Structures are given as structure tokens and as C-alpha cells.
Image: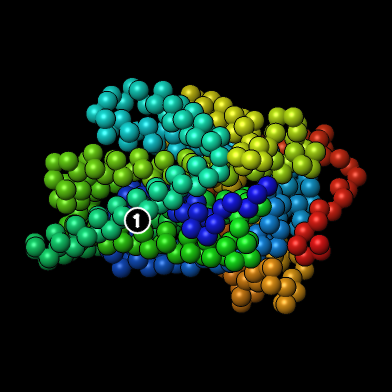
Amino acid sequence: MKRLLGPWGATAMIVAEVVGVGLFLTPAAMMRALGTLERALMLWGAMGALTFAGALCYAELSTRFPRAGGTYVFLQEAFGRRCAFVYGWMSLLVMDPGLTAALGIGGAQYLLAVAGMPSVLQVPVAIALIVAFAALTLLGIQASARIMRWTAAAKLAAVVLFVGAAIVRWLESAPMPDAVSVPLTPAVVAPAVVAAFFAFGGWWDLGRMSEEVDTPSRTLPRAMLGGVTAVAAIYVLISVALILGGSPAAGSDEALVAFTGSRLFGGAASRVLALIIVTAVAGSLAAVLLGAPRVYLAMARDGLFPAGLLRFDERRGTAPGATAIQASLAIVLVLIGSFDEILGFFVPGAVFFLGVSAAAVLVLPRPAANDVRIFRAPWHPLPILFFLVLIVAMLLLFATGQPRETAIGAAIIALGIPASYLIVPAAPHPDTETPGNA
């Protein structure tokens, strides 16, 4: 694969994928659940710090093994091919098409709002979005990178506009509204923590593109850490804007955002905000459809997936067969599930494997300090320990808060274990050459 993804393109991929449908709704959910701006900022700060710790671990692993596949490669290096296969099984059947389908449904909802069309068209519009962005992906990595850069810049501009309007509105009107006192019980804190975690979800997918990133030792750490920091800043600024805009702390998340928007932008607020979210979803779809097939390509290289289906176009940097598989499965999920159901199926499993793969920094020998090709996470092992605490907490919240969806997702993943004994060769696979032993 050619290294065509530069620092800004790599950073834009994180911002584009992470900041999507929940651009306004997630901060609104946080504000409503916690009641005060101070509490929301504290939770954003804590989640941002824990996510930054995970990004440190992934930056080290990505520069140590700059090959297509990301998490799949880290699991294989630390825990063996069978564990990596089960992750690939989950990515193929649950996570990647699930995320693609969820983005398609979310984008369709807001696109219909912009166009003033009936919600009955949600499913066909969602399918059309998935097909359109899959076709865009096949134009080449450069075309996808341009979409991600443009949408990331548009998101940042929209946030600046939103916050600027809120500041002007606050300066021209009455003092900031009084905060609503909300007792901090587990029932209140748990949904806020889950919402905050969702808000940062997806930053790790840049690791899948490691083989196509220019100068991995510099670009990957800067993009991962810079991208996470930019995302945290976006959500903090929007939370501030929701307070400065004079929003009520009651009602639904959608009502809170709509109230703020109407005060800031008048009667056109609903369409302005919907258009911003459509732009955000466009970047997310471009990033997911570009990065996901790299896992299937890595599996095909190891003989765990039919290589004939995964021909890689070296000139364009695309995998038509893998993209078609991902888009087709996503369309099936759009036809049979809702947005929340789809998220519930794949998120717990994704979080589990995220923690296991990050723990590879504890299992693998530390790279030499004088190897300039590898980024070494500072303060080892504190970052990974902090990050694993977050992962365990999230899994407990998922298991107690949505047991049905978590159990279904876990069952699909568990089927990958017997499948691995049929597909993964019993004999050890020859070690793949890495920067550490080249």
C-alpha cells in the first residue's frame, strides 16, 4: 500500500469519524443528565483524559506495527491469530456494517429534515447514502481524504459559529440561567458516562490505516493525540453554548438543542442544525467506509479470508470487494433494525476488543528507547491502566443498562470461536516482518 495519508488527512479522519450524529445531541444529553455546566465540563475532561491515555497506547502500537488492520494486527501480535480472527469476525458481521448502518439511518433522518420530506423515506434514503459513499470510497483514498478534510473543517466552522452566536446572545440578553440541581446518583451518572464515551468513539480506527500513513512515527501520534484533543474541545464548546444560549434543563435532548438553535438562528434553526449534522455524518461515513476494509485485507493476507474477494487496487488505494461486503451487510441491518438497536448490538463488543488490544502494550516487550521509528507512550504503564479502568466500567454499564442487546452482540462474537477452529490453521503462522525486527 502507498503512504498517501498525511498529518492533516489523518487528523481529519479522526475528527470526521468521531464527530457525527451526536454533534449536538450528546452534549445536550450530558447537560440534561448532570444539570450544571461545571459537572458536564468535569466529565468531558475526565473522559477526554482517559481517551487520551488510550490514544497514547494506540499511537505506540500503530507505530510499532504500521500495517493495515490496526486492532486486528495488535491482537495477533500479542494474543495470537485465533483472538485476532474473532475480532475480524466481529468487525465483518457486527461492528463495521453496524456502524455504517447507524450512520446511514442518522444521516437520513437529518437529510429528510433539511429537505422537508416525510420520515417514511428514511430507509431508502439511508440505503442511498451508504451506496453513494461506498462508491465515493472506490474513487480512491485521495478522494476520501478530501471529503474528510472538508467535512472536518466544516464541523469546526459550524462549532465556532454556534458558540459565537451563543456568546453574542448571552451578552445581549439576561444573565446565564440558573442551573438545575440534579442529585448525582448512579442512575444519573451512568447514562452521562455512556454518552461521553460514545462521543469519543472511533478515534482508534486510524490504526487500520497505518500502512497508508506517511511517516507513521510522526504522523500517527500527532493525528491520534491531536484528533482526540480537537474532539474534546468541540464537545466542551458546544456544552458551553447550550448554557449561554439559555436552554432549559428539562425536556428531551432534541428539544434542548432545538430551543437553543431557535434562540440563536431564529426560524431557520432546525434546518441549519440539521444541515450541520448531515455534513458531520458525511465525514463519518467516508471515514468508516475507507478504514473498515483494511481489517478484511489483513485477514486475507493471513489466509483467513478469501483473497479473491479482496483484490486491492494499489493505484487508487481501494478494496472494491471488501467495500461491497461492508456496504451490503450495512444495508441488511438498515432494513431490519433501528438506530439504537444497531448501536446496542456492536458497541459492547467493540469496547471489549478495544481494551484487549490496548492491553497489548503490557504483553509485548517494550520497544528500544533509541528506536526513532516507534513512538513510546510516556509514563508507562499508567496510561494503559487508566484506560483499562474506563473499559471495564463501560462494559459493566453496558451489561446492566442494555443486557438484551449486549447478550445478542456477545453471542454473535462467541460464534467466531468455533469458527476460528475451522478456519485458522493449527500450525503457527510465520511471523510477519515488523519495523522492530526488519
Q: Residue at x 22, y 60 (%)?
A: 164
Whole-percent x, y for residue 142 in the image: 53, 45
Whether residue 335 sits left or right of residue 217 in the image: it is left
Q: Residue at x 49, y 28 (%)?
A: 131
Of residues 110 and 347, the one drawn nearer to the viewer in this rendering: 110
Image quarter hosting the C terminus: bottom right
Of residues 369 and 107, the one drawn nearer to the viewer in this rendering: 369
Above or below for 255 versus 158: above
Whole-percent x, y for residue 359 in the image: 67, 61
The residue that mark 1 highlights is 156
Whole-percent x, y for residue 278 in the image: 35, 40
Label 1: which secondary element: helix
Name the image quarter holding residue 434: bottom right
Whether residue 45 sits left or right of residue 34 in the image: it is right
Of residues 419 and 392, the one drawn nearer to the viewer in this rendering: 419
Above or below for 133 versus 145: above
Of residues 3 and 80, the one drawn nearer to the viewer in this rendering: 3
Whole-percent x, y for residue 89 in the image: 68, 38
Amino acid carrying mark 1 in the image? Leu
Whether residue 8 sits left or right of residue 121 in the image: it is right
Name the image quarter holding residue 422: top right
> Going by the picture, which residue comes out furthest to the front?
315
Residue 41 visible to an observer of this rendering: yes
- Disc 1 packing (10 Å; few <14; some 14–19; many ≥20): some
